[in-house]
Image (cartoon, rainbow, N blue to C red):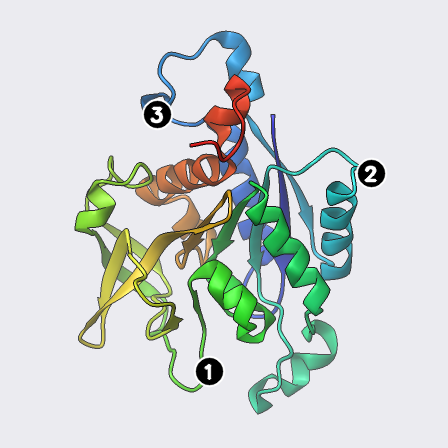
Amino acid sequence: MIRNLLLSGGPGHDFVRTSAALAKILASADEPTSSLGEQRPEQVATNRIVTEIVTDPEQFFELVRSSSQGKIEPWDLITVNALRWQMRQDRYAKERSEWAYTIQENDLQLLAAFVAEGGGLLAVHTAVICFDAHPLWHQMLGASWNFATSSHPPEGEFEVTVTAEGLAHPLTTAASNFFITDELYGFLDQVPDLTPLLSARYLGREQPLLWTQSLGQGRVVTDLLGHSVDSLTNATHESILVRAAHWAARSSERMHGDSVGSS
């Protein structure tokens, strides 16, 4: 069993439904056998992703901390499908009392240590807006929202391109270009040399939509898609999400008892 802790919640999105859908998607499918070879029946249960959804950031970080201290069973994967930041922009004044959140430095250090020690991190859609583009979060995810320059058009249908690098990566090698209805995030602040596996065109530029990062022994997948349940259950996107979660969590290594991060 792969244990996944999911942080959910925030304004402007139906996180109750999208987080439930995401947990169901990850629970209903095992890592594709193309990356594992033939699976024995006893391996199937071992390789399931079981998700605990938490909406309170304080509770979320306490669960991460308890795991790191050995008080509870360790998490293999952390997923952020949430929108929590200080909300200093004037247009969020009415929602600020309910949703504003200030990340603590030691909590971000805790997340970074989790990944560096071999944990997986899956950052979905609004995760790049979370935590006010804190430099450590920005570095972990590879990009972050800039309220001065980042934007997206109204939710609608667009074509997603599998890049040349994507065709060679296990997350997207089985995918072809596909159409999806979603919010197309563009013009984020990016780390140098970010290598997108998926992209889409917006305002005359190819915008990265999916990429991977490494931190120590851990793996991070950032997926800018996922505004709605329809996006998450798009057949191609759903398949990529399953691969992304298992890849980040190093499911095959954990299942076979290998040392995580050894290869």
Q: Between 74 and 224, which is closer to the camera in this rendering?
A: 74
Q: Between 223 and 12, which is closer to the camera in this rendering?
A: 223
Give coordinates of residue 69: x percent, y percent.
Answer: 78, 43
Q: Of the residues under marks 3 and 2, which one precedes in the sequence?
A: 3
Q: Is residue 90 left or right of residue 223?
A: right
Q: Of the residues under marks 1 and 3, which one precedes in the sequence?
A: 3
Does dot 1 land on a helix, a strand or a loop?
A: loop
| Front: mark 3 or 2 | 2
* Amino acid type, residue under disc 3 in the picture: Ser
Q: Which residue is mark 2?
A: 71
Q: Quadrant of the N terminus?
A: top right
Q: Is residue 108 visible?
A: yes
Q: Which residue is mark 3?
A: 35
Does dot 2 land on a helix, a strand or a loop?
A: loop
Inter-mark Cα distance, 3 to 2: 33 Å
Inter-mark Cα distance, 2 to 1: 39 Å
Give coordinates of residue 165: x percent, y percent.
Answer: 22, 48
* Amino acid type, residue under disc 2 in the picture: Lys
Give coordinates of residue 75: x percent, y percent.
Answer: 65, 38
Q: Residues within 10 Å of mark 2 (few under 14, many from 20)?
A: few
Q: Residue at x 29, y 56 (%)?
A: 196
Q: Residues within 10 Å of mark 3 (few under 14, many from 20)?
A: few
Q: Residue at x 36, y 37 (%)?
A: 239
Instruction: Relative to 153, say whether 139 is above or below.
Output: above
Inter-mark Cα distance, 1 to 3: 39 Å
Q: Which residue is mark 1?
A: 147
Does dot 3 land on a helix, a strand or a loop?
A: helix
* Amino acid type, residue under disc 1 in the picture: Phe
